[in-house]
Image (cartoon, rainbow, N blue to C red):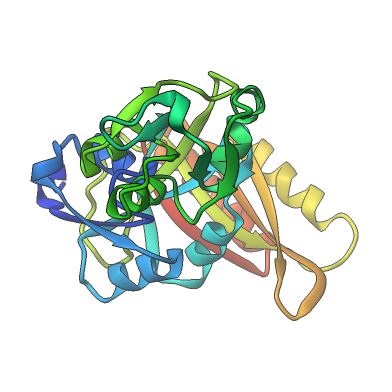
Amino acid sequence: MSSSRELKTIAIQGERGSNSHMAALEMMGADDGALDILPCTLSSDVIDAVLAGRVDGAVLPIENSLHGSVAEHYDLLLEHAIRIDRESLLRIRHNLIAAPGVELAEIRRVLSHPVALSQCRHYLAAFSQARATPFYDTAGSVKHLMAERLDDTAGIAPALAAEEYGANILVAGIEDNAENFTRFHLLRRSDSASVAVGEANKLSLAFAVEHRPGTLVAALQLLADSGVDLTKIESRPVPGSPWEYIFYVDFRFSSVDVAEHALAGLQAHCRMVKELGRYAAA
């Protein structure tokens, strides 16, 4: 089995200093200088970098405990020859960040990704002196205010963004809900050597059933009868086929035989089954 240290380059969606950057560092067990991060504008660019071999792997969010699943990333998992090697959970902490020397009383505008703004709604409502403005990225907001030398603007971003761009945290932990976690996946090309850590006890897959009554219930019953613990189910529409869906499931298993039995049952019942990865549950 390969070591985490063999992964030197990781692609992320968003800027350096983002939650994805933090998740990559934690997942690899590396400090910032030991891991080469490739920031990408689009999630599809992240996958392209993996498939082209420009990076050793990618770290993408798949689900947030408050906002739910990242639908686009499920679609990318299905469409491309990539697999999940690992998962991690990152506690999301939002901080009000400004340029050094700027005081809280001077802030008239707050920039951040719309999701981050919505997760800090209570703080921003009370902080009436400033106008909340959507921006393309959390860490990108800090990068922007530092590059433009804005002394009336703050960003909402992880602490790593302040460190990355030489900014200052004005107020730490302004998120509304402390139970805010994002689940990230480490993704690699399907033909690459495994870098899984720990014994695999969780499996992610996608499947499609025939479009007739009772087929989904029967598929789920097969999983139940096989003895696996279904932890998540997600549906996504099939492009060009109205009211037909691909189902994504995660399940935990006690042994390889149990996992294989579950897969065999689905493959006999479903018109399509794609295993997306086996890994140790976070």
Residue at position x 36%, y 53% in the image: 144
Numbered marks: total: 0
- Residue furthest to the right: 213
Vertically, is 99 above or below 208? above
Residue 51 at x, y = what percent?
Answer: 31, 73
Residue 41 at x, y = what percent?
Answer: 40, 65
The image quadrant where one finds the C terminus is: top left
Query: Which is nearer the eye, 183 or 152?
Result: 152
Residue 25 at x, y = what percent?
Answer: 23, 39
Residue 227 appears in view: no
Vertically, is 92 above or below 45? above
Residue at position x 43%, y 25% in the image: 104
Vertically, is 260 above or below 193? above
Residue at position x 49%, y 39% in the image: 258
- Residue furthest to the bottom: 240
Residue 50 appears in view: yes
The answer to whether residue 144 is left or right of residue 266 is left
Residue at position x 71%, y 71% in the image: 238
Query: Which is nearer the eye, 37 or 199?
Result: 37
**Residue 116: which quarter of the image?**
top right
The answer to whether residue 281 is left or right of residue 231 is left
Residue 153 at x, y = what percent?
Answer: 44, 41
Query: Which is nearer the eye, 199 or 34?
Result: 34
The answer to whether residue 257 is left or right of residue 57 is right
**Residue 66: which quarter of the image?**
top right
